[in-house]
Image (tube, helix red, strand yellow):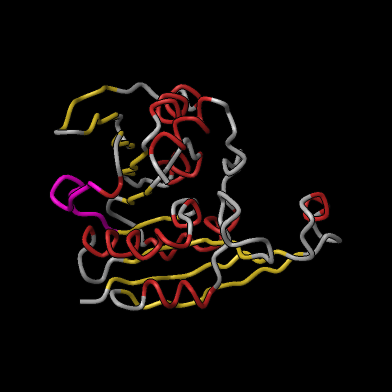
Amino acid sequence: MKAEFWHARWHENRIGFHQSEINRFLLRHAAVLGTSGPVFVPLCGKSRDMAWLAEQGRQVVGIEISPLAVEAFFREQNIPVDRVGRGEYLEYRSTDITILLGDYFRLTAELLGPVAAVYDRAALIAMPPAMRPAYAEQMARLLAPGTPVLLIAPFSPKDAHSGPPFPVSSAEIQEIFAGHFTVEVLECERKTPEDDPQLAEQGLAWREEGVYRLCRRG
């Protein structure tokens, strides 16, 4: 998926993947991220989860390809921000939250800097199946051994190529991250149309939300 796709989605406000509330699985499993040090949020969009993490006393570093998303985040959260060029990236910098505007796949560990943890609620599921191994490889390049990742990924019987968001099974997560990460399933929440009427509207018989703790191997 090319950058133009995401620019168009944000320009047309087709951002059904955005959540207006703090993610409930982040609230349940924030301990995975530890208690100190910067948290990296790949493909962060304008997620309110970043503001929540900052409220918990964490430094947050995001990366996002859409300037509309980045501008919207700081405007909607009413956070003053400075803009500074860093190589091919434009850095939006506030007291607790920094977002790099640019391509995740071109980011280097040196430019990102050391991070204590990663929070992925919307990055992996933005990738079609063919791009997921490259996403995992890039994550491995960016992280030091021992770095934990809190990963949230839905899975449903819809077409694996119809998205974003794209469904990702537990088995596939185990497969694509196995080379560089340990993978632990923390929770799997299954819902049917009786639990969530939107599933019926989407033509889905069920939907699962998987929550995983990954750890970068040495």
Residue 183 position (above or below residue 107):
below
Q: Nearer the viewer, residue 49 or 208?
A: 208
In the image, residue 126 lies at what x, y percent? 48, 51
Residue sticking out furthest to the right: 194
Residue 190 position (above or below residue 47):
below
87 horizontally vs 120: left or right: left
Q: Residue at x 20, y 77 (%)?
A: 218
Q: Which residues are magenta?
A: 106-116
159 horizontally vs 145: left or right: right
Q: Residue at x 33, y 50 (%)?
A: 40
In the image, residue 192 lies at what x, y percent? 80, 64
Q: Give residue 200's quadrant in the image.
A: bottom right
In the image, residue 94 lies at what x, y percent? 30, 29
In the image, residue 72 lies at what x, y percent? 47, 25
Q: Residue at x 79, y 65 (%)?
A: 205
Residue 73 position (above or below residue 25):
above
Residue 9 position (above or below residue 171):
above
